[in-house]
Amino acid sequence: NTVSREGLRVFVRVRPPISKEIKKENAVFVTGGQSISLNSEKQEIQCTYDHVFNELSDQGSVFEKVRPLLNDVLSGINGCIFAYGQTSAGKSFTMIGPNGGQDISHCAPERLGIVPRAATYLMDTLNEKADEGVLSYEVKASFLQIYNENLYDLLRDSGPAIEDKLLQSKGGNTELKIREIPRLNNRSRGSAPLDVFVSGLSEFRVLTSDDIMRIVTIGTNNRMTRSTDFNFTSSRSHAVLQLTFEIESQLESGQT
């Protein structure tokens, strides 16, 4: 149940029509579990993907498709879930939940998106294995916004601050810069692969999935939004939530 061998998988989710679209003719049809048809006056285009979710798909079924990626992360493999689509396509709903995640604490469980479900799954799995003495771990979180080609720390640059009981943030220069460093413990020959990071970005230790969601809530409320013709509260920025896991396995011999 891992996706590491496949590298990249592409899923498509077709949302139901919104109010102003109901009276218009449908141009997108889900024709199977991996295919959709795009119809126009001039032609019909068939597209195939790793999986296609139809208009009736729920949040739980979407999460189950990405769960194998989380198992990869727990095995030490970097993972990324990236939502792409035009304004009002349903990216925030799929990733976080209703209303762009701004009121996630009052959201019905069945309407929670990938991020809160992933946070619960990852932290519960780690806590269970830690209680069994299989491993010890530390998890840190950061939340970044890219807006008009500028970088913003969503947990520091504006809005309410994170409570001190999570952990103190990094000190130093508040100017954010994208940098590259050689990957640690690299065994490959030739040029070493590079890890990308943002210097100056605050990072907080999280102990529970609730801690992660508090960070998501604060960061989401701090995002810059601008009205568009499609969605008045749609954000024209890119938000990147990053969780860093440091996991130390305990072998039967007692060695780590």
Image (cartoon, helix red, strand yellow):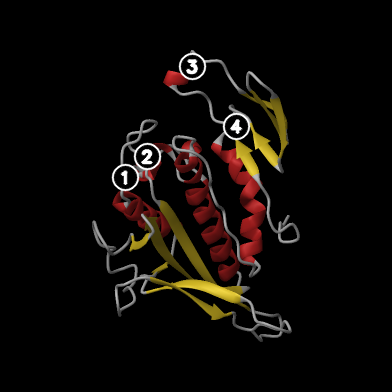
User: In the rendered image, which quarter is residue 226 located in?
Assistant: top left
Label placed on residue 22: 3
Secondary structure, mark 2, is loop
Determine whether, in the image, residue 32 is placed left or right of residue 233.
right
The reply to whether discs 4 and 1 touch (Cβ–Cβ < 8 Å) is no
Circle 2 residue: 234
Three-letter code for the amino acid on which mark 1 is drawn: Thr
Dot 1 or dot 3: first in sequence order is 3
Circle 1 residue: 225
Q: Distance between the residues labelled 2 and 1?
A: 6 Å
In percent of the image, x 60 and y 61: which residue is there? Answer: 79
Determine whether, in the image, residue 201 is placed left or right of residue 184.
left
Q: Distance between the residues labelled 4 and 1?
A: 28 Å
Q: How crowded is mark 3: few (under 14 residues within 10 Å), some or many (20 or more)?
A: few
> Can you give x and y, in whole percent of width and height, for residue 151 in the image?
36, 63
Q: Distance between the residues labelled 1 and 3?
A: 26 Å
Kindly tell me whether residue 137 is visible in this rendering: no
Kindly tell me whether residue 146 is visible in this rendering: yes
Circle 4 residue: 57
Marks 4, 1: nearer the viewer: 1
